[in-house]
């Protein structure tokens, strides 16, 4: 490992651009660590966009001494900061820049001091600093730097130790913040900072490629912004009315400018007044700009306070109660597991409840407009069905429950929506598929419901599954692991083998009028086993037409119908 005792503008530029590239490459990974119920956006996207802005300012800087480059980076981060994580990252670099102001190059001691000042400024910027977050990671990393700098003047060795300390601090975050341990993740902001510090080490050590130094172009940044807005999440269990300070208020002020300016800017005075108006307060500034983020009930007072210190550059106020309610409404639809499988529907739409991608495709091929994922062991709620009806956007709806345990929920849903809905009480997937043979998109709701109900009576249904416990039913002893053939809701076959059960069930179902046998095999069955069953059915009666389909359904290796 090459020894470096001075960081020049060349190394510093590589460090900043490597950090921006690392965050861009890992934004999605960081996003997936988010666990908190706030509709502010995703941590990885926020940090990546913030750092990309800092890197752009660094590249555009005309002065090449480290102090000027660090100030430019800090300015870029300040202007581009998104979300709390991006703001705190900008504060780390603000402290860093303050520490190295006027320096041509950086020694190991300069670097250690800059990291410590970054940590101190970051802690000060947060109203109520919380351990187990990005703050813990920067504090532990800076502490390690200040310990090892007494032992070495090599900035590469120092950043190696900083990188290790940051990773260790990140690993400890679940022990410091219970919500992280509950969900089983590390802090997302801390993870983002670890990527930054690791990139610094790699840039200094030479363990980095030109590709790793590339930062996102404008098109990539625009896409990340879209993903930021599309990915905004909130906890659907959070009651909007429980939000104490309901307006997320962001204000940017050009200090000492404008006709309303009548107060000299003092950070503590400015901050302390805002602290009385709400929570989640962040105040960041340089010599020209002060940027505020606060959750408050009085955004007007926040804005008015800002005008005393200069000219308003930007004001943004979001009603978080409305945002939260919108997220709840959207999540309800998502949690209903509604799969809209037609982009347009006629005046009448059909919603089926089913499990298995292949089964869903079968319903789709017959004209079903949407699937609610569910069935045995995962019955959808009334709310799920109501949400599906609202999502589909038709003037009237037919529902195929395909399970008797769903009838009551479906009936309740009918009473809770504003459009006409009829429930065709199909008890099995096979009945649902057969009912669709009687569906006519141009017919009225009642005619369709009657015809579909009539059609479903023409099919006999069997389900093959495995017993999960010992029992005795209708004089038949059943042991855990036995294979069961359930014909139209009654256990008619019990054997020790899956194929034997399926064949016996078909034997009981067919008669002289039977023409078509349909076998839908499940996710744990291979196609060769389905074909083997097909051959066995034809051996019973070679005049039958036997169809097999891959339903990918859980729990039931075979769903069989005879018509």
Image: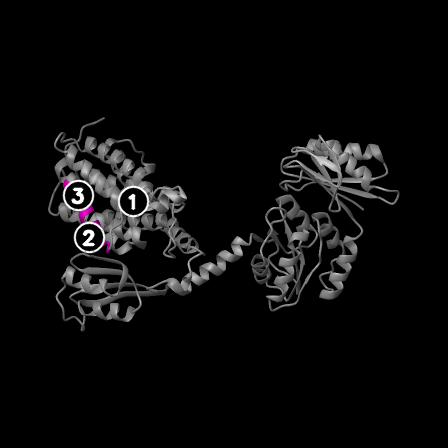
In the rendered image, which residue does mark 1 sit on?
Answer: 132
Q: Secondary structure at mark 1?
A: loop
State the extent of the magenta-drawn residues as a range. 113-127
Q: What secondary structure is found at the residue carrying circle 3? A: helix
- Left or right of 96? Residue 278 is right
Query: Where is residue 369, by image quadrant?
Result: bottom right
Q: Earlier in the sequence, mark 3 or mark 1?
A: 3
The number of callouts visible is 3
Which residue carries the number 2 mark?
124
Point 79% across, 53% down: residue: 457
Tag in front: 3 or 1: 1
Is 398 situated above or below 61?
A: below
Q: CA distance from mark 2 to mark 1?
A: 16 Å
Work out whether mark 3 precedes mark 2 in sequence or the reverse, and give the earlier one: 3
Is 268 positioned to the left or the right of 465 in the image?
Answer: left
Contact? badges 3 and 1 (CB < 8 Å): no
Q: Is residue 120 magenta?
A: yes
- Residue drawn where x is 81% and y is 42% of the image: 509
**Percent position (x, y) of residue 166?**
26, 38
Location of residue 134 by image quarter: top left
Query: Which of 488 and 356 lies nearest the eye of the viewer?
Result: 488
């Amino acid at each position: 490992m090459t020894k470096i005792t001075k960081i020049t503008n060349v190394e510093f530029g590589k460090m900043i651009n490597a950090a921006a590239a690392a965050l861009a490459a890992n934004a999605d990974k960081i996003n997936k660590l988010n666990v908190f119920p706030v509709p502010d956006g995703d941590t990885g996207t926020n940090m990546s966009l913030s750092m990309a802005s800092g890197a752009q300012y660094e590249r555009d800087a005309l002065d090449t001494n480290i102090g000027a480059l660090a100030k430019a980076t800090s300015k870029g981060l300040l202007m581009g900061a998104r979300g709390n994580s991006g703001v705190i990252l900008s504060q780390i670099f603000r402290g860093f820049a303050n520490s190295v102001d006027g320096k041509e190059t950086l020694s190991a001691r300069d670097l250690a001091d800059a990291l410590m000042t970054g940590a101190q400024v970051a802690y000060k910027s947060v109203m109520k600093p919380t351990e187990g977050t990005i703050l813990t990671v920067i504090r532990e990393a800076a502490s390690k730097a200040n310990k090892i700098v007494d032992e070495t003047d090599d900035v590469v060795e120092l950043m190696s130790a900083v990188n290790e300390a940051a990773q260790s601090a990140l690993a400890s975050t679940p022990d410091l913040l219970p919500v992280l341990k509950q969900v089983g993740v590390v802090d997302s902001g801390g993870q983002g900072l670890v990527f930054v510090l690791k990139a610094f080490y790699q840039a200094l050590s030479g363990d980095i490629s030109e590709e790793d130094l590339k930062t996102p172009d404008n098109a990539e940044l625009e896409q990340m912004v879209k993903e930021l807005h599309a990915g905004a999440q909130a906890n659907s269990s959070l009651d909007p009315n429980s939000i104490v300070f309901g307006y997320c208020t962001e204000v940017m002020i050009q200090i000492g400018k404008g006709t309303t300016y009548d107060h000299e800017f003092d950070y503590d005075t400015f901050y302390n007044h805002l602290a009385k108006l709400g929570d989640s307060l962040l105040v960041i500034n340089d010599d020209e700009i002060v940027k505020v983020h606060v959750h408050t009930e009085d955004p007007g007072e926040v804005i008015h306070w800002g005008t005393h210190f200069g000219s308003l550059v930007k004001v943004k106020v979001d009603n978080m109660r409305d945002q939260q309610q919108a997220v709840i409404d959207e999540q309800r639809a998502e949690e209903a597991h509604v799969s809209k499988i037609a982009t347009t529907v006629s005046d009448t739409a059909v919603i089926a409840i089913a499990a298995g991608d292949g089964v869903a495709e079968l319903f789709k091929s017959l004209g079903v407009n949407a699937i609610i994922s569910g069935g045995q062991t995962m019955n959808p709620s009334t709310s799920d069905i109501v949400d599906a009806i609202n999502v589909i956007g038709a003037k009237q709806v037919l529902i195929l429950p395909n399970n008797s345990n769903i009838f009551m929920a479906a009936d309740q849903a009918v009473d809770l929506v504003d459009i006409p809905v009829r429930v065709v009480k199909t008890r099995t997937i096979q009945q649902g598929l057969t009912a669709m043979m009687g569906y006519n998109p141009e017919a009225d709701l009642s005619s369709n419901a009657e015809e579909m109900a009539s059609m479903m009576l023409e099919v006999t249904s069997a389900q093959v599954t495995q017993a999960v416990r010992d029992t005795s039913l209708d004089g038949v002893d059943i042991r855990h692991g036995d294979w069961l053939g359930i014909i139209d809701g009654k256990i008619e076959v019990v054997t020790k083998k899956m194929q034997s059960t399926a064949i016996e069930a078909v034997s009981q179902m067919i008669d002289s009028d039977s023409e078509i046998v349909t076998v839908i095999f499940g996710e744990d069955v291979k196609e060769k086993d389905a074909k083997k069953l097909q051959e066995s059915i034809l051996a019973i009666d070679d005049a039958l037409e036997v169809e097999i389909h891959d339903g990918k359904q859980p729990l039931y290796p075979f769903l069989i119908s005879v018509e």
